[in-house]
Amino acid sequence: MATMSTTFTASGSFTLTDENGVVVFTYSPSFTSTSNTAAQALYTGEHLAQTGTSELALTDVNDDRVYVFIKNVDTDYPVEVEANAAESSALEMADIKPGEWFFTPMELNSDGSGSSIQVTAATADQKVQYLICDAIDN
Amino acid sequence: MAKNYTFNASISCSATSSTGYSQSQSGAFSLDITGIDQVQTGRLDVATGGTVIMAAPTYGKVVYVRNLDDTNFVTVSMVDDADNAIAILEPGEWFFTILRDTGVIDAIADTAAVTVEYFAVEIDSNA
């Protein structure tokens, strides 16, 4: 076990307002993970999501649980985000249009058959940005 | 009666190593949502046998869930099946996603029932 730990922090803000200007709800959640000395890697960067499916390279990541943030930074088309699921079929976890993002602490694959996050552009290749960090197992 | 809404979302996240290495990302966007019926929010007890967070919407949804429990994790999934997990939330953790499909969102507590904070808002085909 490494002696150098990793921590992850996520702070969000969400507001829904109706057509009369009434705020239906507002939430401002935040958490900082416990210090993780088992973390193998953190990845950040930019990737071209292709129409024929492409994968974010996660060679050393913990497939049991990772923090994943992905944002569509292109201008034209949605991008679908999928993880390999335990039942050997890809599971769509988000469908993000340009400017939109999603964040989740997720399992990449519980059956051990591979660790990957697939990003697929709907109509033409689109750029996404990401931050992925190992989390402590659940 | 169906109504119109504006939804705003923003995030700032960072991963920091005790070596001093750190990376961060952020994002913000706004959605105009037109003529929808399903707006659900509040707190909910999630059972070990599974609890529906959102019934099937007409087109899609934005979903947020935060685990308010002190001890146990909760799994958020498509349909009543922890193997189809979108999120595995330890105490205090939260997730947010946008799905443009008609699937049900379900949550399953691991060891004992947990309370979650959530919203699930239907979105229309133009959002």
Image (cartoon, rainbow, N blue to C red):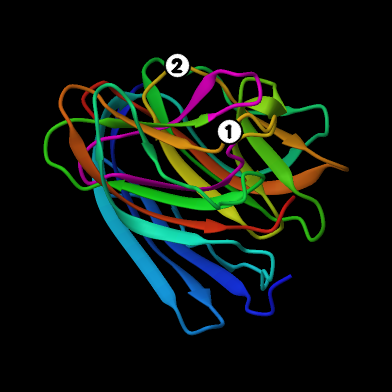
Measuring from the top left, give residue A14's x and y in whole percent.
40, 54
Amino acid bearing label 1: Gly
Q: Residue at x 58, y 71 (%)?
A: A7
Q: Which residues are magenta?
A: A84-108
Q: Which residue is mark 1?
A: A114
Residue A55 drawn above or below residue A53: below
Amino acid bearing label 2: Thr
Q: Residue at x 70, y 54 (%)?
A: B90
Q: Is residue B72 visible?
A: yes
Q: Is residue A95 magenta?
A: yes
Q: Chain of mark 2?
A: B
Q: Which residue is mark 2?
A: B102
Measuring from the top left, give residue B107's x and y in whole percent.
68, 33
Nearest-to-viewer mark from 1 and 2 = 1
Towards the viewer: A88 or B7 = A88
Q: Is residue A23 visible?
A: no
Secondary element under disc 2, as helix, strand or loop, is loop
Towards the viewer: B116 or B93 = B93
